[in-house]
Image: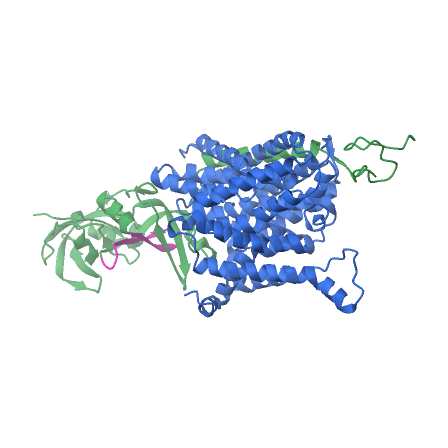
Amino acid sequence: MSVDIPLYLLSAVAGTLLGALVSFIPGLHAYNLAGFAVLAYLVFPFDPLVMAMFMLGMVVGYAIISNLGSVYFSTPDDGVLFTVLPSQKYLLQGRGHEAAVLLGMGALTALFITAAVSPFISQPLSMLRRLLTPHLWWVLGLVILYMVQSEWPKDYGSRAKTRLGRLKDGWSTPMAGIITLLLSGLLGIILTNRSIVPIDRAFQNIMPVFVGLFAIPWLLTNLISRVSIPKQHVTSDICASKVDVARGAFTGTLGGWFAGYTPIVTAGIGSFLAGHATTTRGDAQFTLSYGAARFAYYVGAFLLLWLPFVHLARGGMGWIASVVYSPKEEWEFWLAAGAMVIAGLVAFGLLVVMSRALMKVAQGTFYKKVSAVILGVLLVIVYLMTSWEGLVLMVVATGIGMIPVMFRCRRTNCMGVLLIPIFLNMLGWGPRIVEALGLV
Amino acid sequence: MSAKEKICPYCGKPAGEIALCTNCGAELYKRTTFKPTLLAAAVILAIGVASSYQAAFGGISVMKVGDLTEIHNYAYMWFEGTVSDGPRYRRTPSVRLDFSIYDGDEISVRAYSEDAGALVGENRIPRVGDRVKFLGRARVELGSKWIEVDNSQTKFELQRGQVDETTIREVAGNLATYRYKSVQVVGVVVGAPVEYTTAYLYTVKDENYPTYTLSVYLHKGLWELTSYRPQLSAGSRLQVLGGINGYYELAPSSLEDIQVIP
């Protein structure tokens, strides 16, 4: 078969490098760039497989390198430390590089498992798809229910003296989670039925909302934080046993795959579901699991598009790529698997190198300067991509996104923006609710 | 500092003899070096190289019709077989050329719109007895199976069957032997054709041994593919090129495969 394999692999590596560049900016996603890449392709058509490989590289780069942003540029103070990722605790202990390497190792293990297993799962997955498709609505419903149910009351040591006071304390966090979920769900329903974003920018409809729900609260937290990051250290080994590595990465991969396969469920949700299911313990396991879940979710979901007999468009990149390209032959799957592996190794190498570079500058309150710059960049990007209407949408979403920060519940509740409208539509209630809200 | 006391590899401070560094919280004993990671990376790289090699030189794996199940519905696969029936052609409600292939099991193959147009325009209409290898989308639903041709321009290989110039007597006397084979015979039209909803069935007899006859299957759509109109009235002497289908009928792929000879 005469195919230009080196060109395709190079496209993937180029995509990885570009994905790595955008991965630093919280809120800016590889998907946003992919949208522009598709537009460029439609104006100047070229081999769609080159485009698809480029997108694969981008998503691989994003899945691995974006971990650096969550380690070095997300710096909560002690008030919210309780509810944030262990990677930030590592940073405050001078072990940011270790957290980055753990996240990378998780991704590398997920890459290994995905590459090793994917050639054999076409037929079982195809069968599973036939079995599961009619039941996805209640699976999604259970995921939402579990998210609510697993919010736990947090004891801050300031126990109220009255019963009512203690009841209020106990419910403050779970209630904040429920309110976040419901408000973001309502925003999602409005957004999917009557968005204020101009129709010619509709392909970036969701971007200002995600920036508002996740990135801006993160940056604002950084800006008001009083923490000074200590000097970071590099060691020749990591603080995790082999069992931690195996268990954390396996759990994360499972969670990532579940999230990648189930519509709307994201890596964070999949990771915490799998973590609970397999009783993941300790910061090292959690960090590894998170790195693995992100990779398995972003890349695993995209790989489904190539899987023989399956060819399932899942995840943002899958949907975007399927606009211009649909793989049909087996060799394309092997090419995608090869490109995924090579891009993954390049990204892992970049992660280590970039982490070493970042740890030298990410000390003291450097993160505040970075956060301020990123905040400015995001505002400009949101305005350019979605006009002032997008900025309004972003501000509304920021209000919802600040609830978890202020009331210390899980940020994954913000995913209600997608989970709830899709669940209601699957349930068949969507149109009636939309009508009741006067959105039609 | 006692002999057992460790220096924390992270903060560089004395960490005591306990499992966790008292200064930064790092685990001091349950540690893993990067060596296994590098080894894993090497193994993963090998998988990547092997996958890329497979993509470049792996060849095409062909799906057997008998192995198709409902899980393959809408899946793209390569198929290979001998054309066993057809061709059938229609213009409305959508352009469609269909035929059947046999690889141990028989299945209907459909080419729509541009794919049908490419096969017709390039004179590559499959004839019973031809070998075809093509990329198609399997459809398995409601108890039926069929394949939809995908990209007939570049993903459809047609190898014309070797034509056996023989007699109607020879073919009619050995029908099982000639099944799914291409033949060219000379004969005389007997009577009027039997008309079905979608096809005509002519009877042609061996001019030397009139008791030996063959049915010639002509789908009505063939009249839409060419302006050539052979004289098919009773008594016409014809040279017919076609293949013997599963019903033991002689099936040409075009009216141009039928020549009236003096």
Q: To which quarter of the image does residue B191 belong?
A: bottom left
Instruction: Tell me what residue is drawn at x 60 percent, y 44 percent.
Output: A219
Left or right of A416 on screen, residue B229: left
Is residue A344 shown above or below A409? above
Instruction: Tell me what residue is drawn at x 64 percent, y 60 percent.
Output: A176
Quadrant (top left, top right, bottom left, bottom right) of the C terminus of chain A: bottom left
Left or right of B143 on screen, residue A338: right
Coordinates of residue B55 in the picture (x, y in percent): 47, 37
Q: Is residue A124 visible?
A: no
Is residue B219 shown above or below A90? below
Q: Write down which chain is painted green.
A: B
Task: Using the image as rendered, state which of residue A116 and residue B105 is in the foreground.
Answer: A116
Task: Using the image as rendered, state which of residue A56 and residue A114 is in the foreground.
Answer: A56
* Magenta span: chief secondary structure: strand
Coordinates of residue A221 in the picture (x, y in percent): 64, 46
- Rendering colour mode: by chain
Quadrant (top left, top right, bottom left, bottom right) of the N terminus of chain A: top left
Q: Residue furthest left?
A: B262
Q: Write down which chain is painted blue.
A: A
Region in magenta: B92-112
Coordinates of residue A375 in the picture (x, y in percent): 55, 42
Task: Using the image as rendered, state which of residue B83 and residue B46 is in the foreground.
Answer: B46
Is residue A167 shown above or below B152? below
Q: Is residue A250 visible?
A: yes
Total count of labels: 0
Q: To which quarter of the image does residue A356 belong?
A: top right
Is B96 magenta? The answer is yes
Coordinates of residue B164 in the picture (x, y in percent): 24, 44
Is B19 magenta? The answer is no
Q: Residue furthest right?
A: B2
